[in-house]
Image: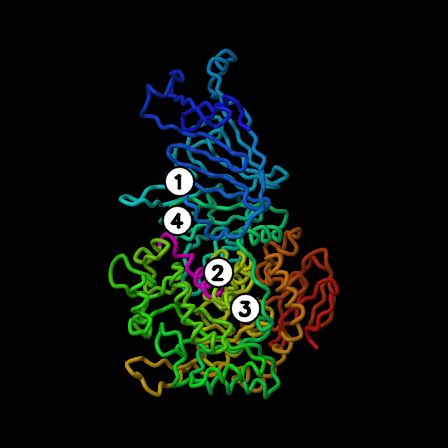
Amino acid sequence: MHKPNSLVSHNSALFILSPNGQDVKHLFYLGGNTRWQPAKYYLTRRIIMTIHDDGKRLTLSQGGTTLRMEAWGEHSIRVRMTKEAEMNTEDWALTEPIPDLTPEIHYETVDMTPAFYRTAEERAAHAETGTKVTFRNGNLTAVIDPEGVISYYNEKNELLTKELWQNRNRIDRFCVPLRIDARELKPITGTTDYTLAMRFEAFDDEKIFGMGQYQDDFLDKKGCILELAHRNSQASVPFMISSRGYGFLWNNPAIGTASFAKNKTEWTALNTKKLDYWICAGDSPKQLTELYSAVTGRVPMIPEYGIGFWQCKLRYRTQEELLAVAREYKRRGLPIDAIVVDFFHWTMQGDFKFDPKDWPDPEAMIRELREMQIEPVVSVWPTIDERSENYGPMADQGYLITSDRGLCVNMTWMGTTTFYDATHPGAQKYVWERCKENYYDKGIRCFWLDEAAPEYCPYDFDIYRYHKGPALQCSNIYPLMYAKGFYDGLQEQGQENVLNLVRCAWAGSQKYGALTWSGDIHSSFRSMKQQVQAGLNMGLAGIPWWTTDIGGFLGGNNEDPAFRELLVRWFAWGVFSPVFRLHGERSPYYERDVEYIDGVRQFSSGQDNEIWTWGEEIYEILKSYLLLRERLRPYIRECMREAHELGTPVMRPLFYEFPEDAACWNNADSYMFGPDLLVKPITDAGITQTDVYLPAGHRWTEAATGISYDGGQTVAAKATLEIIPVFVRDDCAYDIYE
């Protein structure tokens, strides 16, 4: 496939490329009027680039750096680069089998004679040519110019994105003397590791979506700088969808940043072994998410209890307290699918078992809940207290995260604890075996995997070290591996349709049944508004199972009328969220009966958090929303099936369904819940009416009034406490408001 004797140049250097990619004769340019001469005379100049392909993948070698390009799924390309002798084989998020695809690879000789030669005689005497390489997989094409600069095009030959090189190696195009490369791997002194930067051109018309869950007000991440790191309420899932028609996965779990600035797009990693990214092209956002989920994995089919209502609070203190709540829901005839046994039900952090003082007969509790058709969910933390019965065995076997300096203590909340190392296969198995013995064998089938960021105190990532490497290099993989350990364990027991509630996620977490929620967020309208953006971007980043603490987690006072209004608005939005879960730390706290028992500090609980907690008027409103969710169960089930089969987010921005409507790309306050229901959450206090944009080309019916409208216009919608604005697409029949 090689063109014989192709001349390739870069950084004032040339080589002759033979047909088999071997036997390269290097030539170097000295500048001025000096002619091209053999390299043996000028050893101070570096060899720049060789190209080789084996019919499946393309390899570029330049200056001790190797770049590999290969087809990776339909309409997709994976790019890796290293300075090591061999390419690291870690696939990170790209774990799914891919079809055996053969890309089209073409070579073209192009004229590179410098522009300052004017006459035909001069140009002939100093004629230079280079090789342009085209690598095409489906409707995505990578073009590598003679200097090694990569540009990506769609099937219409429209530019999608392009590497940003800021140098002056060629003066016949725009150049600057900054000497900044698009791809930078810089060795960290005294190590075999590198810092990494990857730079692309910025485009004024580009909008960027996805990237996971960040606590900000922006659906469109263009103009944002995003930390590629997990924190409580922040989940870095580094897949983005561009309005220009491509998707991009930063396939690297290292701590770093993604900057989508006006002047450039820049991805960085503080400590890594290689550059690794995946890019795809598609005609619509839907096609991009389908391509992405095909290579990273799709959620299982959600179990039936995942569709209904989840009751939770911080926290039910005893077995009898929890059962009393479950019984009351049934006595009132209220639908409820799951109830949660929250943290500190255990004897000690890291023991992974019920405290018999407060939970004397868990088997009987679980049996009664199942008889009421309520699924019990049990909280598990990855923190291992130094006094835990498992601390010694786990430390001895290297199953705990270690510290490169200072004490091996990761968190000091309610004990001196260290996180178990979820990247260690042995640690995964050990923790699962303890949980199987003490929870699964007693009847628990769904787990709440809390603290999955993990929540370091402090977040000094340069201190910690995992089985997979230093935390700076691989910390973001932790929540995925945490979920995987339980997913694998449950599957070994023959369980299908695994679902576990997890506080954090990374690219690919969805395939391990991770239901992510947005962490310990504030109880305020400002926070609620941010969660809407977080949920939409999590779905676009490949995480379709997502939820929040309805009412927020921190700061909600049950006696405050302002909080009660917020709770109703959040509950209404929860009906139209992928998973409908009421949770929060309601104030004021109950008093502790005792501070310590057997040297273990006792944790109290927030106030009541059931739908009858806030008085009869609010109860009737919440009850109506609860019954609405139940009526939508068949519709939600089909939305979940689409997520399982295609990777489609349940909660999706307007442009996802209507990419041809330009106004939808600028709309961040409404969204589609499945294909047919347009929802506008009320995220401000005191609202009774609100404007809603209806996408063009369709007929829309306001669920609360039955009034129909043509799309392509903004209408005023009713928005009392009893009503969340919902519009039904194209006369579809759904029982929203009776």
Report the Cα–Cα distance between label 1 and label 3.
Answer: 40 Å
Residue positioned most to the top: 121
Question: Residue at the location (42% across, 53% down)?
Answer: 253
Instruction: Find out whether residue 686 is within the magenta segment.
Output: no
Q: Is label 1 in contact with label 2 (beta carbons under 8 Å)?
A: no
Looking at marks 2 and 3 on the same chain, the residue that comes earlier in the sequence is marked by: 2
Three-letter code for the amino acid on which mark 2 is drawn? Gln
Please identify the quadrant where the N terminus is shown: top right
504 to the left or right of 350: right
Residue where numbered disc 3 is placed: 495
Residue where numbered disc 1 is placed: 86
Labels 1, 3: front one = 3
Q: Quadrant of residue 105?
A: top right
Looking at marks 4 and 1 on the same chain, the residue that comes earlier in the sequence is marked by: 1
Specify start and end residues of the magenta stretch as a single range.
Answer: 472-487
Report the Cα–Cα distance between label 1 and label 2.
Answer: 35 Å
Report the Cα–Cα distance between label 4 and label 2.
Answer: 19 Å
Report the Cα–Cα distance between label 4 and label 1.
Answer: 20 Å
* On screen, residue 535 above or below 589: above
Three-letter code for the amino acid on which mark 4 is drawn? Ala
- Image mark for residue 213: 2
Residue where numbered disc 4 is placed: 269
Instruction: Find out whether residue 485 is within the magenta segment.
Output: yes
Dot 2 crowding, Cα within 10 Å, few <14, some 14–19, many 20+? many
Three-letter code for the amino acid on which mark 1 is drawn? Glu
Looking at marks 1 and 3 on the same chain, the residue that comes earlier in the sequence is marked by: 1
Three-letter code for the amino acid on which mark 3 is drawn? Gln
Labels 1, 2: front one = 1
Dot 4 crowding, Cα within 10 Å, few <14, some 14–19, many 20+? many
Labels 3, 4: front one = 3
Residue positioned most to the left: 406
